[in-house]
Image (cartoon, rainbow, N blue to C red):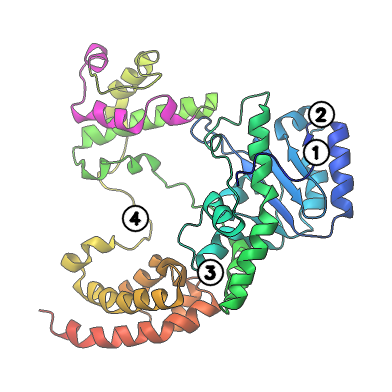
Amino acid sequence: MKLEAPRREVEIVQDQNGLDLMLGELEKNTETLAIDTERASGFRYSQRAYLIQVGLADAGIFLIDPIALNEVEPDWNSRVAAELNSKPWLLHAATQDMPCLQELGFKSTQIIDTELASRLAGFQRVGLGAMVEELLSLELAKEHSAADWSLRPFGSEMLTYAALDVDVLHDLWASISQSLIEQGKMEWAEQEFAALQNFQPKPTPEEPWRNLPGLSRVKDIAKLKAAAALWLVRDEIARTTDIAPGRLIPDRSIMAAIDKVPRSKHELAQNKAFQGRASRSKLDTWWQAIADSSGLEIAESAPNTGAIPHHKNWERRFPEAHLRLKFTREPLVAHAEELALPVENLLTPDCLRRVCFEPAGDVRSQLAELGARPWQLDQVVPLIEAGLALAGPEIEKLP
C-alpha cells in the first residue's frame, strides 16, 4: 500500500508560535524521537540542514525550517537543543544526518540507526524505502529525494515526503529490533549504536584537488598545476556563492581542460569537452587560473597522510601483506555469510588491512585500538589469528 500522507498531525515550525508549540510537546515527551534532515546536496556548497523532521511516537510530527527560524529568533537552536539532546534519537543512516545536526548544536547521547540495524539483521536492501516496503508493506514516495531543499516556499508534496520519512521510523525499528532479538544480535547493535557517539566525518584532505577522478594517472607537473588551479578557483567561487562546485563546471571538465593544457583563452573556449553552467560565463576566470598555474607550488605526488598503500598493489609491492590479507579475509567472508551480515559490518576492511600490513603481534589489542567493537573482536580474532598462522609458511617461501 502506498503511504500517501502522514498518519499523524504535522506542524510546520517556521515562526515563534510553531517553535513554542513544538518545545512544549518535546518537554512533555519522554520517548525516542524519530529524526531526519533534508539538505541541498548537489545544489549548494553548504551541507547544512534546510529542513529537520522530528517525529514523536505518541504525538505528531514537526517539520523545522531552520532558515525561517533564523530570521525569527537567532538563538532558536539552543532552545531546541535543550529538548532534543536529552532524548534518544531514531535515525536511518545516522552518519548522513549527524554532521548537519551537530552544526546546529544537536547531539543526542543515545542513537538508534535503523539502516545499521538492518545490515546487522541480515537484510539485503537496507534503504529506507526498501525496508519499509519489506517489513511494513508500505510504499514511500521517492520523487523528492533529490530535490533542492534550499528553495522556498516548500511545496505541499515536498513536506509530505519529508514527514513520511519519520512517520514510519518507530514502526520500522519495532520490527527490526524483533529480528535482532530473535537472532541474538541486539547486543551487537547496541555496541554499534554506542560507537556512533564518536562518529566524526572524514577530515578534508590537505590537497583535495588530488581526488579529481583520473588525476592519479597524470604525471605531468604542468597538467597537475592546471588541475589544482581550476579546482581551487572553482571551490572559491562555489563557497562564496554557496553553489555546489559541480554546478559551475563538473570534474570531468577540469580533466578535459588539462588533457591538453590550452595556450590561450580562445583555445579553452574551443574545447567542446569543457562544459558546465559556468564554463563560458566565467571563461575569463578559468583561463586566468590556468595561465597563472605555473606559479603554484605543488609536489608531483600527494603528501604522506599516514594511510597504508592501496591493497591492489600489495601482491607486487608488498607480497607479505598480500598473503596475510588473502589468508585472513577468506574466512571472514565465509563467517559473515554464516552470520547473515555484510563482511564490512563484521569488520571494516581498513581494520583488517592495517592488521595485515602492519601486524602488531596481539591481534585483539590492535583491532581494539583501531576501533573494533567487543562483539567484533569475539567473532574475528580467532579467525584472523588462524589466517595469519597459515600465511606464515607461505611468506617464508617468498624470494
Spatial distance from mark 4 to mark 1, Cα to Cα? 43 Å
Determine the CA span between mark 4 and mark 2.
47 Å
Q: Crowding at label 4, few (<14), some or many (≥20) Cα neighbours within 10 Å?
A: few
Mark 3 vs mark 4: in front = 3
First in sequence, mark 4 or 1: give its number. 1
Residue topped by disc 1? 76
Instruction: Magenta stretch: give its range.
Output: 244-270
> Looking at the image, do the residues carrying marks 2 and 1 touch, with CB atoms under 8 Å apart?
yes
Depth order, front residue of 167/296: 167
Badge 1 crowding class, 10 Å Cα cut-off, few under 14, some 14 to 19, many 20 or more, is some
Find numbered disc 4 in the image and state the secondary structure of the residue it sits on: loop
Secondary structure type for disc 3: loop
- Amino acid residing under circle 3: Ala
Residue 115 in percent (x, y) is at 55, 58
How many numbered discs? 4
Relative vertical location of residue 155 with respect to residue 110 in this rendering, above or below: above
Residue toward you, 295 or 340: 340
Label 3, residues with CA under 10 Å away: few <14, some 14-19, many ≥20: many
Picture quarter with the C terminus: bottom left
Instruction: Mark 3 or mark 4: name the one nearer the start of the chain.
Output: 3
